[in-house]
Image (cartoon, grey):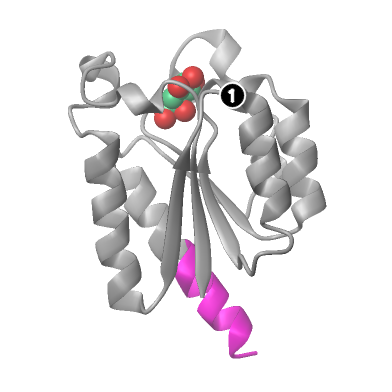
Amino acid sequence: MRILILHGPNLNLLGRREPEVYGRTTLAEIDEALGRIARKAGCTIECVQSNAEHELVERVQAAMDDGTDGIVINPAAFTHTSVALRDALAACGRPFVEVHLSVPEAREPFRHESLLADLALARVSGFGAHSYNYGLEGLIEHLKAAASE
Ligand code: DQA
């Protein structure tokens, strides 16, 4: 099983970006924890971070042909703005989990809308760095159940 982990803009700064909102865990530490979960489950993950919308769109497009079974994505600010990322995920057709460290709906009004949520298999938010772990675990369970049907 092959899972793509996508991190959107400014998540490369985790650890020193507004730690009162996003915590002190770095992106490298998040990816390491995801790697441990994937190894235990016998899955392969690839982690990609980009600040550029077109790079995220292109990586989602590539997932249509590279054997990716599912995606965990924190679209960051693109959650609220990117029709292009939404369209790419819709075209890709792989199940994806939308994760957020914070609870966007509990923050500024411009964060209340997600352009991706209605396409997502699930959404995990508010657990800080652990949101990723729960998102990955849930996606793995879902893919295993689907494979055994
Ligand atoms: C975020 C929430 C977004 O509103 C914000 O733009 C981010 C991070 C989160 O993980 O809580 O960059 O996706």
Secondary structure at badge 1 equals loop
Residue found 31% across the figure and 22% down from its top: 13
| Residue placed furthest toward the left | 24
Q: Which residues are magenta?
A: 139-149
Report ligand 1 position as a quadrant.
top left
112 lies left or right of 13: right
Residue 37, how many percent across, how many down? 29, 65
Q: What's the residue type where badge 1 is placed?
A: Ala
Residue found 30% across the figure and 39% down from its top: 127
Instruction: Indicate if the residue with disc 1 has its beta carbon within 8 Å of ligand 1.
Output: no
Asked where in the image residue 25 lies, by quadrant, the reply is top left
Q: Looking at this view, is 3 or 138 the one in front?
A: 3
Determine if the magenta segment contains residue 7.
no
37 lies left or right of 137: left
110 lies left or right of 39: right
Residue 132, how many percent across, how many down? 37, 48
Residue 72, how many percent across, how many down? 51, 51
Q: Check the picture and name the quadrant holding the C terminus.
A: bottom right
Q: Magenta stretch mostly in which secondary structure?
A: helix
Q: Looking at this view, is 121 or 87 the one in front?
A: 87
Q: Visible in this render: residue 113?
A: no
- Name the residue beneath numbered marker 1: 52
Q: Visible in this render: residue 146?
A: yes
Residue 11, how many percent across, how many down? 39, 27
| Residue density around tag 1, few if under 14, some if 14–19, many if 20 or more, within 10 Å | few
Q: Looking at this view, is 88 or 108 the one in front?
A: 88
Residue found 54% across the figure and 71% down from its top: 142
